[in-house]
Image (cartoon, rainbow, N blue to C red):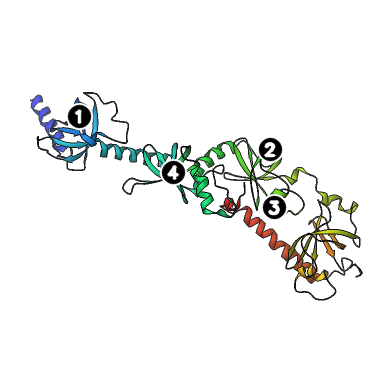
Amino acid sequence: MDTTNNEKQSLEQLLADPNFLKIPKVGDVVRGKVLSISKNEVHLDIEGLTTGIVRGEELCNESSDYADLKPGEETEATVLELENEKGEMELSFRFAGHKKIWDKLNETLKSGEIVNATVTDANKGGLMVNVNKIMGFLPVSQLAPEHYPRIPGGEKAKILEKLRQFAGLVLEVKIIDANGEEEKLIVSEKAAWEERQKNIISSYKVGDIVEGTISALADFGAFVKFENLEGLVHISEIAWQRIEHPEDVVKIGEKIKAEIIGVEGSKIFLSMKKLVDDPWKKIAEKYKIGQIVPGKVLKINPFGLFVELDPEIHGLAHISALSEKPIQSPSEVANIGDTLDFKIISIEPIDHRLGLSLKLNEKTPTPAEEAPKEKTEEKIEEKKEEDVEVEEKTTEEPEKTVTE
């Protein structure tokens, strides 16, 4: 009686199994036990239902899972035909292997694991790469800083020439998009770099002094490599004086010291000038209001002239202080590179401002007599310049104008 009940219970469980007597259809992935292996064919026992065969080009696959199959082992294959001329199920390792690889790529995408990608070619948009025998794409914007094509003006032909030099290089990347149906694989070297950067950054804090090497220059600042990290010294943090381009002070390959002044995610901001005494603290020892001094015109803006009094102290001659007669542009009275005599009309050490005038015979106003309108206008214009600098400092793609 017990035996009969057990058999009945087993039969009910078998019938309840959704896979019981399930007949596969074309495109399904089935499991089978290897019966025999020859050079051109592999025979499988498909769950006791039938015998399957994998032959010809269907033996080739992108996955390594089928490379060392032995009789008796279980494996998977994709159904091509339910029955061939010999009554066997026609199977493919090629499709099954392809699906396995894409499944693994999707798992890697979800886990965020860093994988290797071999560069095979390049176009103007980025690099073609091979990841686990699947072809993918690495956009230029997703390159790590050390591989970003730092080309003046962003000339596409030169960018392509630079990218093609990476052929054969193995890069560490993260998968950021994987779609097997569309055969779409996008990877990012930048994401892998940022993860490594974050892990090392945790050992640093604002105020730390680092020593590194200038790795690249841009209009907005200098990149510095140190301890497998890369930080940015914004142009306003390179020196106390106003400079036109970082290359006026530093060169690629030069070793420098800098202080960490900010950390935002994987981005590190540095300052070189914080390690140097502020020359404006002792400006009273060198310059006085009313003093006539020679100055070199460094830059001409609609609102005035930027003038170098010495390598450390620069000043501004507002357009209203350039001529006794009204003028439309500061370029009417001076050119870049001209050395002229200027009168110092204001000194503001805290704000690092020094006002100059070409009106040498005009009475120097006291602070109470200074024209508030002109002073306010001057500060507004300088603030605009500072805002531009800040905007450059925080931009997401600062490398566009980087020079090597």
Tell me which amino acid carries mark 4.
Asp
Q: Nearer the viewer, mark 2 or mark 4?
A: 4
Say what secondary structure mark 4 lies in.
strand
Q: Name the residue tied to disc 1.
A: 42
Q: Earlier in the sequence, mark 3 or mark 1?
A: 1
Tag 2 and tag 3, C-beta contact below 8 Å: no
Q: Nearer the viewer, mark 4 or mark 1?
A: 4
Q: Earlier in the sequence, mark 2 or mark 4?
A: 4
Tag 2 and tag 1, C-beta contact below 8 Å: no
Would you say 90 lies left or right of 183 here?
left
Q: Residue at x 56, y 39 (%)?
A: 197
Say what secondary structure mark 1 lies in.
strand
Q: Quadrant of the N terminus?
A: top left
Q: Name the residue tied to disc 3.
A: 245
Q: Name the residue tied to disc 2.
A: 210
Residue nearest the viewer, comparing 249 with 280: 249
Q: Position of residue 33 (x, y in %)?
A: 20, 28
Tell me which amino acid carries mark 2.
Val
Q: Residue at x 40, y 44 (%)?
A: 136
Would you say 331 lies left or right of 135 here?
right
Residue nearest the viewer, comparing 57 with 44: 57
Tag 3 and tag 1, C-beta contact below 8 Å: no
Q: Position of residue 337 (x, y in %)?
A: 78, 59
Tell me which amino acid carries mark 1.
Val
| Structural distance between the alpha carbons of marks 2 and 1 | 62 Å
| Structural distance between the alpha carbons of marks 3 and 4 | 35 Å
Which quadrant of the view contains residue 347? bottom right
| Structural distance between the alpha carbons of marks 2 and 4 | 37 Å
Q: Earlier in the sequence, mark 2 or mark 1?
A: 1
Would you say 360 lies left or right of 50 here?
right
Which mark, residue 121?
Answer: 4
Vertically, is 365 above or below 73?
A: below
